[in-house]
Amino acid sequence: MLTKKQIELLGENLSKKIENIARITNPKEIKILIGNEKEFLIEKLLKEKRLVKLKWKNCYLYRTKPYDAARSEASTYIATKKKEDAGPTNNWLDPKRIRKKLFKILKNSMKGKTMYVVPYILGPEKSPYSKVGVMLTDNEYVALNELILAKVTKKAILRIKKGEDFVFGIHSTCKLDPKNRYIVHFPGKNEIISVNTEYGGNAILTKKCHSLRIASFQARKEGWLAEHMMAIQVINPEKESFGISAAFPSMCGKTNLATIKPEKEFKNWKVKLLSDDIIWIHEKEGKAYAINPEYGMFGVANGTNEKTNSNIMKTIKQDTIFTNVGLTKNLEPWWDGLETKSKILEKANPNSRFTVSILKYQNLSKYFFDPFGLKIDAILFGSRRKELFPLVFETFSWEEGVLFGAMLRSETTAAVIENYKQLKNDPMAMRPFLGYNMAKYFLHWLKFGKKLKEKPRIFFVNWFRRDEKGNFIWPGFNKNMYVIKWIIERSKGKVNAIKTPIGFIPNYDEFDFGMEKEKLEKLFEIDKEAWLKEFSDARKFFSIFQNFPKVLSKKLDELEERMKS
Ligand code: SAT
Ligand code: MN
């Protein structure tokens, strides 16, 4: 139970909530984290042989169970009184019944362990858009990740004591039994309970659970957007600044785009990072502004190297917690694509990750600290599609942009346990992360657009188109700067484009860096029959919603007409 001093710090209300959980889970002690406990947790994990000290400075390796090394969508639930409020794309549970079951699972689950109380702020501390929460966990690895990924601070407790709304999260490792794995959100109650998992997005509750699922629910009520997007500030040679945000499903290159490095042909360009994974967008004076709720990155290690992403390589060479990466004889971390002279002892999980503070990233945007955030000028949706979608196109309007976002389908990746490598509908890359009915979410996007006098233009990108032999046509990575540059020039109205039924595509000479014309033609090819099939598939998908916005149906009709004529 809490000590007198702890109760004084936490206040009565919060103390009661925590003691209620302690009574059920029965930990041997309760420890409140205030932000400076990283070394302590690392020491403890090392002593218990749960961390491997790596050769890189202050870097460590943690291994989760192979069956617990990615998000589990099948175990993720939205618990609302009415099933309709979770909508047809979420797993739904009755809140009363599941609460009972979860408390049964939690019974004595922390016996002999420490319960960590983790108070945190999401977003810049002084931002009117920031939110607070408290998470409980019995897992040192999860607590350590929280210390890097969220702003863990006493100040969160002070705000809660003053009466601010807060999210309460309960995580317990239990027996890591996948059959009893539950990640349950109670959006109306601002509560999250996660059991029998210790993997990233399942267990680090500030991440997808609070910053997206609970936040999206709050965002709809309060008139803003919580999005699965990266955001960057791009500065051109004329020293003009642009804000670009992009939503891609997990493992489709969000972090790579967020940390893109302008190469020699873009000598006087700068790209600064606001967020690699999640942003909260608010309207202010008719413009859209984004803040990053997080303080760290939980990025994909696999495939990262000096060639693909030297910025990230520099960042993760020290002070980083690696999860499920491989190992060399020399105790260096290892994964596919990484060079090493040492013998490889162990391969990496395809969803291996790095956890690092965003403050360690050398090109952080000053807007990361701005209470109102970065002004967004262009929004990108993107997915992993081997055919159909061109490298980039600009949609004709906010409504059509929302429609294409809603139509987003992607080849699934190793970031989720289930259905690897299938084509799956993933509207706005938010399907796994939305805390309410998706039809209402589409409507919310349309409404939000109406508030904006200066609407960001909406683009669609696809880095993953392949040729007949199955090879990627586009080199991707830092070459994506060509796409970024085109998007900026379009946003400024500075560059002409080719009008197609789906939107504007670039003139090929914008991509003149030695790519053969044939390849460019293939990259931008519009296959009418295939698009008509795509539209009809979209219609089928939209038909699962009872209240799909009419505006979007009408836009889809128009799009189809244009494609036919
Ligand atoms: O959900 S995680 O944060 O574990 C990774 C992802 O899918 O983006
Ligand atoms: Mn993500």
Image (cartoon, rainbow, N blue to C red):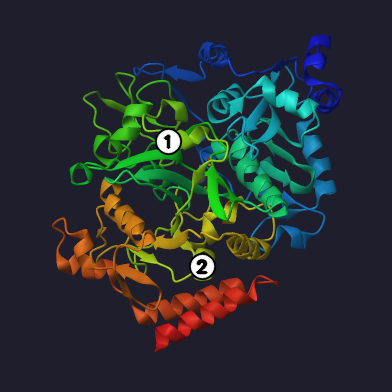
Under 8 Å from ligand 2: the CB of mark 1?
Answer: no
Numbered-mark total? 2
Helix, strand or loop at label 2? It is helix
- Residue 407: which numbered mark, if any? 2
Q: From the viewer's perspective, tell me whether residue 20 is left or right of residue 355.
A: right
Give the residue displayed 61% in from the left and 30% down from the top: 125
Vertical position of residue 482 compared to residue 197: above or below: below
x and y percentages locating residue 295 in the rendered image? 53, 31
In this view, the residue in front, 284 or 294, is 284
The amino acid marked with disc number 2 is Met
Discs 1/2, front? 1
Residue in the picture at 46% in, 39% down: 274
Q: Is residue 511 left or right of residue 94?
A: left
Residue 386 in the image: x percent, y percent?
34, 63
Whole-angstrom CA distance, mark 1 to mark 2, is 31 Å
**The C terminus, quarter of image:** bottom left
Quarter of image, res 508:
bottom left
Amino acid on which the number 1 mark rests in the picture: Ser
Q: Which residue is mark 1?
A: 365
